[in-house]
Amino acid sequence: MKKMLAMLMALVLALALGCTAALAEEDLTAHLKRMADPKDNIQYVIKSAEYGDPDTAELDHTLLDDSTFIELLLDMKFEPADLKEMEGACVVLSFPEENLSYTFSDAPETVNLVLREDGNGKKEMYKAVELPERAAIGNVMDAWAFGLADAQGLIPEETPVPLSAEEKAFDNAWNCEDAWVDLFTEDGGWRAVVRNTELYYPKGVQWEYALGYNPEKKTLDSVSGTKFEILYDDNGGIEITKTLLDDCSATFAINENGKLTWQEDTTDAGKGLELEPIGRYNGNSWMSDRVSLEVFLEDVNSQKVYITWADSAFETNAWTYACAYDPETDSLKAEYVICEKVKTDEAGNENREIVYEKESEAVFSKDADWKLTVKNSGEERLDALVFDYMDPNQNDG
């Protein structure tokens, strides 16, 4: 008899827990469905201990499209859970008009638990069953709160650690007769793009590396690297045609002469090469009203700045400045200039007349926004211009 009574009590308890979970699931699901329906206009509040006092600081949920988060929560299924305190940074979803709240946590031990509380102080804890390839319910709420806090400007921007002088020296484009290298910071680390003349034009070879700075050796050492075959088009653009080698590794260093060395460990491609800094002017274009400016690399560190100013459809002024890169000022300094008057007839034939050819002290500089200016050009009208960078990847429609 006692055994039968115990079995009946266990069955009643299981049914009660099942009903609790079912009622809690049905209750939360019903509220979520009302939240998903803009016509319902249900009033709800989201608070987070991570971004303020959860008892007072509300996050403005109108600043973000919350439909994705609601859909993720609607997919959840629940089962009874032992009542225990929440851990970690909690997010609270509450419905003030009904004096009802749900608390979620991102702590590993309680990341799938949901605490339901009503105005009478009654608490119920239940567990969201994880679905394959879906985030835990606490992580969904944490992401929702983060998105709202970010939209309100409550997430402080991370202050990047400034580069040392030795590390900053790598941040440049480099060139020699047999190779070209671009080194730049990206996502807290370093990236390198390397091209050399291993294959015959229009084919070429390109290496791409992810790198980390080694402060003891003062080098950039690769974390990963890949070698590609590329194809140059008529406009100087490139297309990666196939992968030649995975798991490439390399080391970049700056020697006592201020030149870059590239040691490719998997091949001898960089052996004996010394590259000079050339800035990031080569191959780029700028524009100011009817005046265009283009930069071309002619030799190891000999760059031509070509400026055209159209007076009319048939008459153009053209200046060609022969420049060298100055790494200390990150600018191009001219050595001489040729000024021409270019006349074009209706058939498209050009007649070029040299106006002057002389030494020049022109200096071309770009700022952090890539706006370019020229000083001492020998032409006051050029010195008065500010050139806007023409991004080759920008589609003007």
Image (cartoon, rainbow, N blue to C red):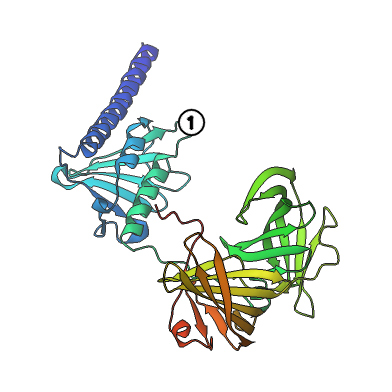
Q: Nearer the viewer, residue 230 or 36?
A: 230
| Residue at x 29% of width, y 56% of height | 54
Residue 238 percent across, percent down from the top left: 63, 52
The picture quadrant where one finds residue 363 is: bottom right
Does residue 41 appear to the left or right of 67 in the view shown? left
* Above-or-below relation of 206 to 80: below
Q: Which residue is mark 1?
A: 132
Q: Does the image show residue 162?
A: no
Residue 131 percent across, percent down from the top left: 45, 31
| Residue at x 51% of width, y 58% of height | 392
Residue 55 percent across, percent down from the top left: 25, 57
The picture quadrant where one finds residue 255 is: bottom right
* Above-or-below relation of 180 to 372: above
Q: Nearer the viewer, residue 156 or 13?
A: 156
| Residue at x 36% of width, y 32% of height | 76
Q: Check disc 1 and report its element: helix, strand or loop.
A: loop
* Above-or-below relation of 356 to 8: below
Q: Nearer the viewer, residue 218 or 125?
A: 218
Does residue 114 appear to the left or right of 108 in the view shown? left
The picture quadrant where one finds residue 242 is: top right
Q: Nearer the viewer, residue 275 or 127?
A: 275
Does residue 143 appear to the left or right of 178 in the view shown? left
Q: Amino acid at mark 1?
A: Pro
| Residue at x 65% of width, y 74% of height | 303
Q: Does the image show residue 123?
A: yes
Residue 81 percent across, percent down from the top left: 38, 34
Does residue 21 appear to the left or right of 358 in the view shown? left
| Total number of numbered discs in the rendering | 1
Mark 1 is surrounded, within 10 Å at the Cα level, by few (under 14), some (14 to 19) or many (20 or more) other residues, namely few
- Placement of the N terminus among the 4 image quadrants: top left
